[in-house]
Image (cartoon, rainbow, N blue to C red):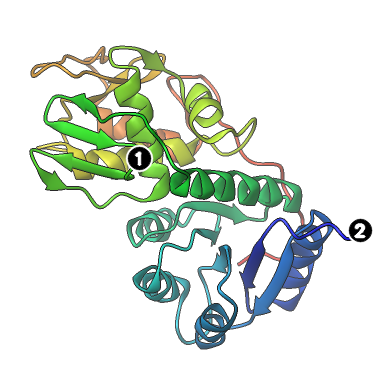
Amino acid sequence: MQTPPLGRVLVVDDDPTVAEVVAGYLDRAGYDVDRAADGPAALDRADAHGPDLVVLDLMLPGMDGLEVCRRLRARGPVPVIMLTARGDEDERILGLEVGADDYVTKPFSPRELVLRVESVLRRARAATAPKTAGPLRAAALTIDPAARRATKAGAELALTIREFDLLAFFVRHPGRAFSREELMQQVWGWDFGDLSTVTVHVRRLRGKIEDDPAAPRLIQTVWGVGYRLDAGPHGDADRAPDVPQRDREHDREHGHDREHGHGRETEGWTGPRA
């Protein structure tokens, strides 16, 4: 008896070598894979076949990946993993802002990408599963896991899947500090990966829940550890006085990790770069 596919994945990349390698790994992992080489074709295939997830290259000819992501998310809640060139920090943050659920930097390991696909799909499917848990509350925040809805002082927050999962995790564990490795493992189920993923998601989340993201009161940076949610009205961070918080986080995203003493990058694939 033939095993049904794990899901339908649309791979969008104008580099045929990258697209072929990614599609091959996903196919061997048990996914039904469709391919498109540009933005308009990707939107047409998404309309025709309804993918469960889209792997989307940022640098596409004509309509770029950011615009494709905007249009995909406007049509429905399909999860998106963005492929970006290493070091494209602004584009990476923009991708998360327009609705991408995750990103992988080139050159990358196809095996890691398959694990990311599995993780994002697992989270997306869990989001639609029936739940009986009641709302979670911290300060002015209310998180309803069953409805996948978060509000601040009654105003609804527009969160991506990963932002929602991260916020719900923090609210479930107020006052406890977590390293970025712990957040990757416990929130998203990753055993390895680029730690700057956590930094970027925390930054984006702060921009949506903090009164002043430059001086956060809720999600605090804990010097030498990682991050902590302070649910009280006047939480204090364990910060080093001589290094501004924004400077430390900038260093993290560029691999100069003062808090952990090292930089980490994903397993490299020596194929084409963007």
Q: Which amino acid type is marked by label 1?
A: Ala
72 to the left or right of 175: right
Q: Earlier in the sequence, mark 2 or mark 1?
A: 2
Toward which corner of the image does residue 176 lie, by quadrant? Answer: top left
Image spot of residue 107 (x, y percent) = 67, 56
Q: Where does the C terminus fall, quadrant-wise?
A: bottom right
Give the residue furthest to the right.
1
The residue shown at (46%, 53%) is 101
Q: Where does the N terminus fall, quadrant-wise?
A: bottom right
Does dot 2 land on a helix, a strand or a loop? loop
How packed mark 2 is, by other alpha carbons closer than 10 Å (few <14, some 14-19, many 20 or more), is few
Toward which corner of the image does residue 217 lie, by quadrant? Answer: top left
Q: Which of 89 and 9 is in front in this view?
A: 9
Q: Which amino acid type is marked by label 2?
A: Met
How packed mark 1 is, by other alpha carbons closer than 10 Å (few <14, some 14-19, many 20 or more), is some
Disc 2, disc 1: CB below 8 Å?
A: no
The residue shown at (45%, 83%) is 63
Does dot 1 land on a helix, a strand or a loop? loop
Residue placed under numbered mark 1 in the picture: 146
Image spot of residue 262 (x, y percent) = 55, 24
